[in-house]
Image: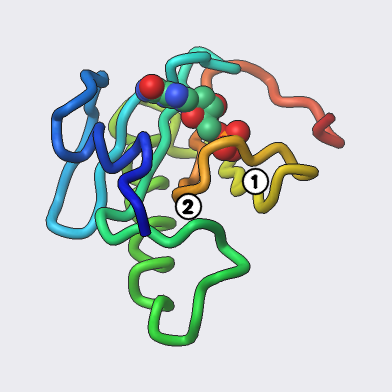
Amino acid sequence: MADTLFVKIINREIPADIVYEDDQCLAFRDINPQAPVHVLVVPKTPIAKLSDAVDGDAPMLGHLLLVAGRVASELGYGQNFRLVVNNGADAGQSVFHLHVHVLAGRRLGWPPG
Ligand code: DGP
């Protein structure tokens, strides 16, 4: 995969407000926040979208979810947060490097737009 915008953030070629990092993923604040807490959790080994994932990606996918929950907790919203994965342009995906949105800090409506 060519370097994505998020790979550039992982490589510190583009600045971001990083809230968590480990060997598998990076979490940083969304540039266009939709809630008081809006963080993106991205794998360091990118896949374009969730529908490209294979069985071997299961540990990485599970790790992203665990980290997303921990990030919400660290930022004070461990019991009330929403995770979103947009898959494909028609579902709202604009950056084709899999990422989990962590949204918290306000009442979140349902259904989403
Ligand atoms: P999605 O639409 O699901 O692909 O989400 C992509 C998100 O990425 C969107 O909410 C805005 C965010 N984003 C785009 N460019 C940048 C950037 O340069 N820095 C940061 N921190 N976030 C970005």
| Residue 1 percent coordinates (x, y) | 37, 59
Amino acid type at image mark 1? Asn
Residue 46 occupies quadrant: bottom left
Assign a secondary structure to mark 1. loop
- Identify the residue at image location x=35%, y=52%: 2
Residue 14 occupies quadrant: top left
Identify the residue under disc 1: 86
In the displayed structure, 32 sits above or below 98; it is: above
Assign a secondary structure to mark 2. loop
- Identify the residue at image location x=59%, y=17%: 34
Task: Quote the CA–CA distance across marks 2 and 1.
Answer: 8 Å
Q: Which mark is residue 32?
A: none
Q: Along the line of sight, which residue is nearer the eye, 22 or 75?
A: 22
In the displayed structure, 90 sits above or below 5; it is: below
Confirm or reject: label 1 Cβ below 8 Å from ligand 1: yes
Identify the residue under disc 2: 98
In the displayed structure, 49 sits above or below 27; it is: below
Crowding at dot 2, Cα within 10 Å, few <14 / some 14-19 / many 20+, comes out as: many
Q: Along the line of sight, which residue is nearer the eye, 47 or 83?
A: 47
Amino acid type at image mark 2? Leu
Residue farthest along the front direction in this orientation: 2
- Identify the residue at image location x=40%, y=35%: 72
| Residue 69 percent coordinates (x, y) | 41, 47
